[in-house]
Amino acid sequence: RISPVHHLHSSEMWPFSSVVSSIKEEQMKIMMLQREIQMAVNVARARDTLQWVGGLYSAFLSSVALRAASGGSVPGLVVLPMVAGGFFLSNLADMAYGTKMVRVRKEAERILSDPSQRARLFVPPKQAPFYGMYEPELATDEKFHAEVNAVGSYWPSFLGLEWPMPSEAKPGAE
């Protein structure tokens, strides 16, 4: 469907369509630059974190190895941070220097192209001013998520709190 505003911007109807196209292109370039700067800052932050945490992890491993080499006892519980730290640093190194960001981008593309994923992840609350723009996804959302309740209806019910709270009467309930 074509909106009335889109129709007005066609080249036959509006003499300034080339100006609008030029402005849109400049806006897209600025958005692209902002995105690239933010991504570069995030990767730089990951690399910095990797250096600091990697240094701390190396010092920890060195101290454990020195303790073991000197004949001292090393508690068995030390294995847990050694293994967990290795996984954490591997994940961080993959993001900072590997292909993790490419895999994440491809997964984002897959999510955006799948209507059921879009309905599951992107439908905003009904109070959002752009809620109606998700019309194609709303039917799928209602179909698959009709039995899913708000978080507050699940927990902390053991504390005796009611949902909805008395100030939030359900529509039609008296």
Image: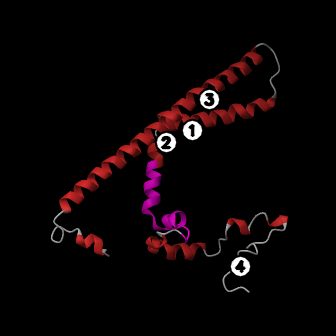
C-alpha gap between disc 4 and disc 3: 50 Å
Question: Viewer-proximal residue, 121 or 98?
Answer: 121
Q: Which mark is residue 53?
A: 3
C-alpha gap between disc 2 and disc 1: 8 Å
Residue interval drawn in magenta: 105-127
Q: Earlier in the sequence, mark 4 or mark 3?
A: 3
Mark 3 neighbour density, 10 Å: few (under 14) some (14–19) many (20 or more) = some
Mark 4 neighbour density, 10 Å: few (under 14) some (14–19) many (20 or more) = few
Rendered residue at 43%/37% (across/down): 40
C-alpha gap between disc 3 and disc 2: 19 Å
Residue 20 picture location, percent across and down: 24, 59
Which residue is tagged 2?
Answer: 100
Residue 108 picture location, percent across and down: 46, 54
C-alpha gap between disc 4 and disc 1: 47 Å
Q: Is residue 71 above or below residue 11?
A: above
Q: Are marks 4 and 1 in contact (CB under 8 Å)?
A: no
Disc 2 versus disc 4: nearer the observer:
4
Residue 89 picture location, percent across and down: 60, 33
The residue type indicated by label 3 comes to Val
